[in-house]
Image: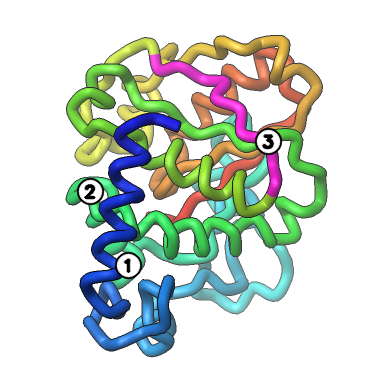
Amino acid sequence: MKIGTTLRRAGEALVSLLYPPHCAHCGADTEGGVHLCAACAGQAKMIVAPFCQRCSEPFDGAITSGFTCANCADRTLHFDCAVSRYLSRGVVREFVHRFKYDRHFYLRHPLADWLAEALDDERIRAQPIGALVPVPLHSARFREREFNQADVLAELLAQRTGTPLLRALTRIRYTTTQTRLDRHERMENLRNAFRVHHSAAVQNRHLVLVDDVFTTGSTVDECARVLRAAGAASVRVVTVARG
């Protein structure tokens, strides 16, 4: 175990001894190990049918059967499906941002809970999972942030589920932030940004990519493309939330 991880966990244990457990959103008292009270958990906006079977984008119309949204229908995707159980709104968005940018590491636990719900989706359960693959950060971004949120969440999810964790991808090209780019610009920005460095380990395996938020899907699709090119049997995606 890395020294930084050990110290972080020791610090969290000390905090739990000094302060009573409370909801990280509203501050209400909770049971030990519970970071979100029932009332705040109920505010998390869940994605419910009808939604796109490929990317989980919700639809407000009166569709009663499975469908593929226009965003997925007019492009070639390399992942079989991308599953999020929640929209990146309110408390879900807050927790992701506090974990990712403010280093509130204890929030990895409720985020992993939401990821585990995505794993329980029938689209994921339809095929055995050979390994969980975290979406990587470029080394420069990693030095800046000091951790990779997708890797932390994937490791915790692997521990909870007993699923193998496979760090099969490396980000070999630094890319500008995707925030202000449209879908086409994101795709160009990410072209050839990833490389598989465990080719033999991915061959003929059913892989599940893990990331924090699905927005346009450009990042996970490029990851899926290189994994499939390296011989992966299939690639599915789970994220904490959908943007």
Which residue is found at the position 25% from the left and 31% from the top?
146
Q: Which quadrant would the N terminus be assigned to in this image? A: top left
Query: Residue 134: within the magenta?
Result: no
Task: Estimate the spatial distance between the alpha carbons at disc 1 and disc 2, rounded to whole Å.
Answer: 19 Å
Query: In the rendered image, which quarter is residue 131 located in?
Result: top right
Query: Residue 167: within the magenta?
Result: yes
Secondary element under disc 2, as helix, strand or loop, is loop
Residue 73 vs residue 139, the one in the foreground:
139
Point out residue 209 in the picture as x, y percentages from the top left corner: 57, 37
State the residue position of label 2: 103
State the residue position of label 1: 89
Q: Amino acid at mark 1?
A: Arg
Q: Amino acid at mark 3?
A: Pro
Q: Which quadrant would the C terminus be assigned to in this image? A: bottom left
Which residue is found at the position 35% from the left and 83% from the top?
40
Which residue is found at the position 36% from the left and 39% from the top?
5
Query: In the rendered image, which quarter is residue 50 located in?
Result: bottom right
Q: Main secondary structure of the magenta part?
A: loop
- The number of discs equals 3
Secondary element under disc 1, as helix, strand or loop, is loop
Q: Which residues are magenta?
A: 162-171
149 versus 76 height, above or below = below
Disc 1 packing (10 Å; few <14; some 14–19; many ≥20) = some
Disc nearer the start of the sequence (2/3)? 2
Q: Amino acid at mark 2?
A: Arg
Point out residue 218 in the picture as x, y percentages from the top left corner: 44, 33
Task: Estimate the spatial distance between the alpha carbons at disc 2 and disc 3, rounded to whole Å.
Answer: 26 Å
Which residue is found at the position 22% from the left and 33% from the top?
145
State the residue position of label 3: 164
Q: Are marks 2 and 3 in contact (CB under 8 Å)?
A: no
